[in-house]
Image: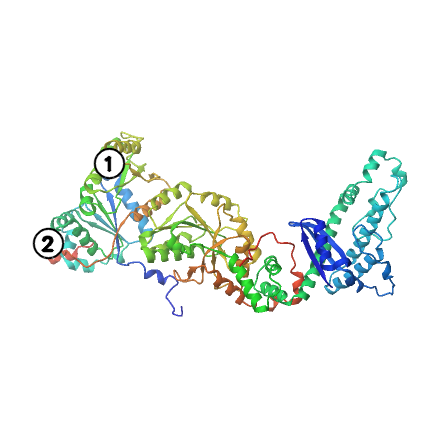
Amino acid sequence: MLEIAPHQASGLLKIKNTHATRFIAIVKHADAEFELPLLWRLCASLVELGHTVTVLDTTTAESHTQPGLEQLLDNDFFHAIANFQAQGWNIIPAATGLQTLAALAQQQAQALHCLNQLFADAGIVVVYGPSDCLNTLFAHHRIHPLLAVAAARKYLLSSYGALKHLLLHGGLKPLIVNVTQGVFAANKDPAPDMLAALSKCVQTFLGYEAKIAHTSVQLASPDAGQTLQALALRILEDALTLERAAPIFTPHVHRHETDYLEGSF
Amino acid sequence: MNIQRFIAPTAREALAKARAVFGDETVILFNRPSAQGVEVIATVEESLAAFEPRPTVEKNKSERSVPTPANTNRSSSYKEVASKVEEDATQLAMSTLSFQDYVRERMARKRHEASAAVTTPTDAGVEPQKKRARGVSFNAVPTEPHHSSAIPTAVAGVKKSLPSSAFASEAAPSIASELQAMKDLMQERFDTLTWLGQAQQSPVKTNIMLKFIRSGYSPALAREVVAQMPAELAMPDATHWSMEVLKCNLKISPSEIALHEEGGVFALMGPTGVGKTTLAAKLAGLCARLYGPASVGLITLDTYRVGAQEQLRAYGKMLGVVAHIAHDRPALQDLLGLLAGKKMVLLDTTGLAPRDPRKREMLDLLNLPDVKHLLVLNAGAHGETLDDVINAFKAPKSQQVVFSKVDEAAKLGPVIDAAIRYQLTVRAVTTGQRVPEDVEAANAEKLIRASMRNASTSAAFDAKPSDLGLFFNQSSTFQLNTSL
């Protein structure tokens, strides 16, 4: 009682595990026409809420000019200099690195552990990729990937396929959000009852009641910020939180030339 | 002067009680209906003997008879009563002119009624009053003979049987209201005299009453406790007895489980600035400490106060808990579904004044199954302010409350008093600003002791023994459990 704490909530800091990392999964099933704008807006909302966000983009491969996860796995030096806390928003190509990680890890849990070690101070890690990639990392974990659907007929099949793959192979139950407006709007093979059709398919063929966000996201609307913030908080609530533990698997692929040090991300 | 109050189901029984105490020399000063039946205030005749007027007006004691309400031959004795009461009232710095005149008027009217019962309708029957009670106009009494000749016989026959109150109200509606005001005034005066009599007889009760008032308890509660106190108690025992009664009547959670251990969905409500958001952070911190951050859900409905969402979000971030925002009922229900698996979900609401028109909207928003309302009361607030808040945020089910800022309150009496009178269940108290340390489960004994320990430090607000007569109140409207 007599000690003077830095501030009134100092007691709370002792409760939280400051080294816990939260993983969010966003499913890529269609073209990037509406998924990427949604992804960027969600990341921006999370940053506005005061979080540090690192996006692992499994749709983009690493290269000499664009180092990413592969290089992080390969060279501990990158890990040492990657001060994620200092930056609000990091985007890391991870197509090759994730495959490498999956191949090297003897168990699926090791891959996730390795990521947890690499991004221990990253705050929030958003993994954006197809369903098979997400299953590799998060199968049977308590995480609800975000599956965005738009009101066009072509997206019905792809979203159903992604949902089925997540459900049957990974045991993951995605959160479905309806995204409206934009260039993918109703004039291109519209499907006004997209969500209803998807829910019906899932219920009929998979025996599963789809989990749908109660509000649609209208990206071009002036009120989209409030909706996106609520959605960002919701997917944060569904995030997988991993505490820092002793490393059980340290992948070393091979050593590259030091010119990798010149790459920045 | 020994004046006592007697309460019984009927007037006859009350009079019998008075006579049992004072014997045949009982003088009835006042009677009125009460919740328990009839209340009679009486004294003994020899007390009235002390009211001999200063000019020597010799009274033949043999002429005195047992006074009854129907005996109208006591105009001189009642004058003595009135003059003595005037003396007492003067000591209490009260104006008694109206009381004195009122007594005279009452006796005059009784004589008029008695004479009117045996006279013809055309007979005036009312003696002209030499003096009138202030504010009462007996000119309105229709006694002029030339008017009576125009009154139909049937109506006049009905008129003479009307009770005096109806007679007055028929004459002028203002007379009835003024008579009621006089009646209330006389009742208040006699109550004060009764209290003074009791105080003289029982210094212990006086001291206990003073202690209650000084601790911030309401005169109503203090009087209720003192009225039921056993007469034979000495001061230390009386203090202990009083504190035990308060402790018995202050409802604490029967299961004695802390809020964060009980779990569930709690909506924190209350006026502005009582500490709802800080309390939410404290409870969230305690629950997270026991069951982990994943066991807690935070939702804010406060979209009005600047920085409200950011404040809760800051606490949530420190805890590793997401602080959601709900703008409307569907969003709230959706979030409650999302957080259904949590041990504890806390809803922070907008602070609203008791008379804020948005209060009804918020109460309707929170009227959801499984959402428990937790009213946050500032322990240092004034008693009437607390009454307003409690009435404004009344819940259909039993009301649970949290006393906030107990460490800042000069007196805990008002808030404990409100909790007892409204039968509120006190779940927790906050004792400082630290999050989450400064919150603890409510302990009745600890609270009562703390309330009695806080002596008034400000002379301006400190009640003196001479002020006790002014802290009088009518009979209380709540029942106190004194069976220890």
Seen in the picture, residue B455 relative to B352 is either above or below; the reply is below
| Chain of the residue under the numbered disc 2 shown in the image | A
In the image, residue B418 lies at what x, y percent?
54, 55
Q: What label sits on residue B35 in the rendered view?
A: none
Q: CA distance from mark 1 to mark 2?
A: 35 Å
Residue picked out by circle 2: A253
Seen in the picture, residue A83 relative to B396 is either above or below; the reply is below
Q: Is residue B311 visible?
A: no
User: Could you tell me which residue is drawn at 23 percent across and 40 percent down?
Assistant: A32
Residue B53: name its quadrant.
Answer: bottom right
Residues at discs 1 and 2 in contact (Cβ within 8 Å): no
Q: Amino acid at mark 2?
A: Val
Label 1: few (<14), some (14–19) or many (≥20) C-alpha neighbours in 10 Å = many
If the image is split into quadrants, where does the N terminus of chain A sit? bottom left
As drawn, is B177 to the left or to the right of B481? right
Q: Secondary structure at mark 2?
A: loop
